[in-house]
Amino acid sequence: MQLKFQKTLVPEQDGAAKIPAMCWSPNNAKLAVATADRSIVLFDEQGERRDKFSTKPVDAKYGKKSYVIKAMAFSPDSTRLAVGQSDNIIFVYRIGEGWTDKKVICNKFMQPAAVTALTWPTEQALVVGLADGKVRLSNVKSNKASTLYNTDIFVCSLTPHMSGKSILSGHADGSIVRYSFDSGGAQGKICTHPSPPYALAWTASSVIAAGCDKRVISYNENGRILQQFDYSAENDEREFTTAITNPSGQSVVIGSFDRFRVFNWNQRRGAWDEGKPLQIQYLYTITALSWKPDGSKVVCGTLCGSVRMFDCSLKRGLIRNKFETTHVGPSQVIVKDITTGNRATIRSDLGYEIGEIKVMGRDRYVVAHTSDSLLLADLESGKSSEIPWQSGGNEKFYFDSENVAMIFNAGELTVVEYGINDILGSARTEFMNPHLISVRINERKHKTNEDVKRMAYLVDLKTISILDLRFGSTFGQINHDTKIDWLELNETGRKLLFRDKRYRLTLYNIENEQKTTLLSYASYVQWVPGSDVVVAQSRDNLCVWYNIETPDRVTMFPIKGDIQAVVREEGLTEVIVLEGSMQAAYQLDEGLIEFGTAMDDNDFGRAVTFLEQLDQGADAQAMWRQLAAVALEQRRLHVAQRCYAALGDIARARFLEQTLRIAQQAAKQIGGDGTQFYQVRARLAIMNKEFKDAERIYLEQNCLDEAIEMYQSLHKWDEALELAEARNHPDVESLKAKYYRHLADTGQDEKAGEIKQKENDYMAAVDLYLKGNLPVRAARVVTEHSELLQNTDLVQSIAVALIKNELFEKAGELFEKTKDFDRALECYRRGKALNKAIELARYSFPEQVVKLEEEWGDMLVQQKQMDAAINHFIESGNSLKALDAAIRARQWNKAVQIVDVVDNSDLAKEYYGKIAEHYASIKEYDRAERFYIEAGMNKEAVAMYNRAGKWQEAHRLASEFMGTDETSEMYLRQAAELEESGRFKEAEELYVAVGQPNKAIAMYKKADQHEPMMRLVRRFHGEHVQETHKHLASDLEEKGQLREAEQHYMDAGEWKSAVNMYRAAEQWEDAYRIAKASGGDTAQKQVAYMWAKSLGGDSAVKLLQKFNLLDETIDLACDNGAFDFAFDMCRLGLKAKMPAVHLKYALQLEEEGKLPQAEQQFLQAGKPKEAVLMYVHQQNWDEAQRLAEAHCPEAIPEVYIGQARIAFEQQDYAKAESYLLRANKPDIILRSYKELGMWPDALRICKEYLPARLAELQDEYDNEQLKSGAKGA
């Protein structure tokens, strides 16, 4: 590593203006510099000054110059700055995250001596070094300070370990002391440096100390010297004043006068290498150093007040022109997204050199390799991890989860959580697909506040395993009957959704191992972010489960497209649906989502915050009530009080306010939060109306009076008296008297009567009941005690009161008890208690039983209790009323039984018709027909069958009860009506039934329903089937219904007509299809030729090449005389065929007598000889001679031979001989002379031109002479 000057932040002053301290914020955003004028200047990471504020003394009375700043340190969260001063105090300033935040003092810690050093390694641990030798710990949360250890020697330096778990302090006597926070406060001196170690650094491998003796010494953690660098012999070297180590612990910079000394750790040697020192003249003594946490910059402050920034990167690079890499050390690299500014620092804590760096996973995640480890980082969160890893180069990385990286290698899945330098978990699986693995790492806190790190993955295609990554144990395995193609855990890791290849969606509850099928078909499913709400699509329905704990309660909306995503932002949750080319957003109920999630997580603050933003409607009130109930259950009284206040329930709000006061007092007296105090628990039980629980709580504390007082305040005197008597309270009687007076004063005569009844004072009880207008209670007391029945006046007064209140049945019971049966029967009748009246009449007035039965039936009919009335009418012998009641009660079986015994036939027929209508309505047509005929309603029976479409039964009845002509006319009329209404099938049955199938055929033809039409034609006119198909096809072709026309053409065996139809419509694909299927090879080629001809050009060539018919089509075009098309095809697709086409064209032109054109085609075909022969054949010798001499010299003899042949035919032998000699064909002359018997000429020619054959020819001549006798022996 080398330092390179970058810029000056603060220029030097003319005199001494020491920079006493400076520090970088852990988030790299701010640099704080303390100046000599006791101010703090804040710079951004680029070194631009952004803010400045002044510090203050411990007390204003000492003046602003009574102190100097000695040390500074940022908090781990970068929002606070601790400033240590020489006036024995530390101020902690809250400076916020932005530049405009107000600077306020949030903590101050008084110290027994001046502050000399500060470090803030962890959130709560602010460590202070003092001039009196103490090292103290200041807790910013409790605002308290304590001494860690005391050496009584001036603390000149403090430095933390890289982990933040230990510190080193350097003292004026040279001692270096180590203190560990993890080991229960273990501390001890590790070594004594030869001089005060003002320059002290704790690296990854050793402790570096330096001071005024100009020596730099490296110690191990046990104090043994590892290396020593001695500069005491160099005259230009001064004492070392300060030291700093880079964040990776691989480099150290030590400042002195005008010079930086740099030391780099050599991993191979295991020792420090001294780098080239940086000499800066007139820099003067370096008083402060700070290394930027990402390792890219070092800032120094000097005695003269200058602040300078140095770049300490080894090299820089670009990845895909989007990501900048800065190597600040062999084992530390900064990766920055140039477009967004997001950065991550990847550092090998094991000290390995970082090699290849890649940015993957939506340009968010960084992967880097070292020789023995793997580094992973998230650019957005800035978290990084390092794990031991031997790379084979075959790893596959998956970054679908924001909290973890998944690495798949050789069938093993490894999970790494960002920010943790260890493998979180691993599993064996062959199914590495983001949709088949789900990992949840503390994405949302559950109400149990349990740490959740779970993963679901496939063991095989039908088995899901759920792994607890905290312990590496499997606590769930799901066996399914179908292959699984998608799964996902909810954010709390307690529920799992998965879908199989059949698109069945299943919910698995991990806690109780219960599996529930949500949908039988789901094409899309997703958990709504930040909740346990499920969104799914089932065909054309959007399904939403707002409460997944009740999976049977699903909200469904019809949609017209496919779900693309679920988006939740700015307080809205929308389901994005792609409807054609447009996107539609369906908004979900955010209240149910947000509030339900908060309730599931027991996040009451979140629930209250959400409800306060809602309008106070019915839904909001229901949510407030639900939250109040849960808050009360968990003793969150402040939340419950807020809920009841929002609901306007002032009584409960005040009651809870009083309860809170009691709880607060109890908390002060006995500790805790006070909610377990017995009065608080009892009051909450009272509020929930659990009075017995409240009583139990009071009695457990021996507070009987409080329990009784509770019941009294609630006006529950019975419970109060019962409790007092059970516990033998001394004031039971006075309590009873007080209760009785209360009842009397408040007019509660009934309650007073009950008390008198319990005390066996029946007369007083009856008087009180009558006074309170409760004659029924009075009558019950009298009837239960026979001695009171003897009191006629008492009974009479009760009966009068009962009748007055129209309680006739009770009055009748009272009269019956006193044997006054006449008045009892009268009261029963008036009170409509006819059951009791009949029971009384059976033994006292038998002659009135029948009449009472009929009255009872009439009453039941008035009350619409038809079922009950039937039997009473039968008992009274009134069959007609019983029949009417049975029909009105729809008791048809009873009605049939009753109607059969009715004597009046006319009335019976009327009821038969009603019964028939009922059976017709329930489609029991046989029974309905019987009752229609019994009622003489024959036409209605026929109409019933017609309505039911039972034409044969209707025809049977109509033929039986109506004439044939009338039946036919009715059916034809009915069929016409059915045809008019579009009920063609029923109309067909009617037409066929009356023997008119042609009308049915015509009906179907008119309606363009050809299939049923052809069915009837095949059934009734088989000889005309093909003709009908052909006729239909022609009609359909005219209408443009080509597919249907094709079917009919094919059924008629007219495939050529179908081809011509498609040709005429220029639907060549269909024409070719039919020709290929039905016409064979020749027809297929012919159609392909015509199709290609219609296209022309490249399209035609591509088409023919597709069908592999280019060669045959060119031949076919030539045969048809389409030579222009043939030439185009050859030129564009088959140039080798061009000469053959020219030849065929030449032959055609020759036949047509177009010889010049034919000559050109022969020549283009490369057949000049054929052109010569053409002219020879036409005896055009000049043209033949010209063409042969110009293009085909070897054909010149053919011209002469032709001329010679004509000369022989004209017997111009001399000319013929001349031509043949010019053609060098003396053998032809010889043969011709021999055939003509011109032997002398033949011998002459042979002698002159064929002397070798002369002897043979002479012998032939002699033989010929001998045969003819021309030559003697």
Image: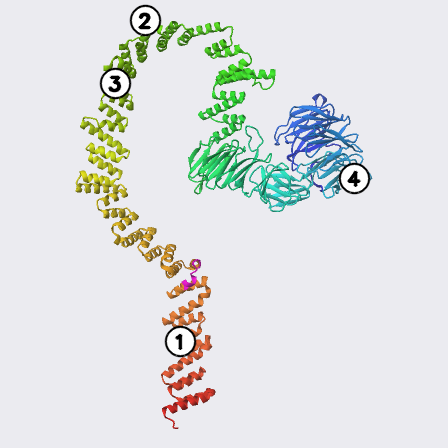
Q: Nearer the viewer, residue 468 or 183?
A: 468
Which x, y percent locates residue 87? 73, 24
Classify mark 4: helix, strand or loop: strand
Which quarter of the rendered picture does the C terminus lie within? bottom left
Identify the residue position indicated by label 1 in the image. Answer: 1175
Between discs 3 and 4, the one toward the N terminus: 4
Identify the residue position indicated by label 4 in the image. Answer: 229
**Badge 2 amino acid:** Asp
Identify the residue position indicated by label 2 in the image. Answer: 793
Which x, y percent locates residue 486? 50, 40
Which x, y percent locates residue 321? 60, 45
**Residue 1113 within the magenta-colored segment of the rendering:** yes
Between discs 2 and 4, the one toward the N terminus: 4
Mark 2 surroundings within 10 Å by alpha-carbon count, few (fewer than 14), some (14 through 19), many (20 or more): few
Identify the residue position indicated by label 3 in the image. Answer: 855
Classify mark 3: helix, strand or loop: helix
Q: Left or right: where does residue 141 sit relative to residue 986?
A: right
**Badge 3 amino acid:** Glu
Q: Which residues are magenta?
A: 1105-1114
Q: From the viewer's perspective, is the residue at label 1 or at label 4 nearer? A: 4
Determine the CA span between mark 3 and mark 4. 127 Å
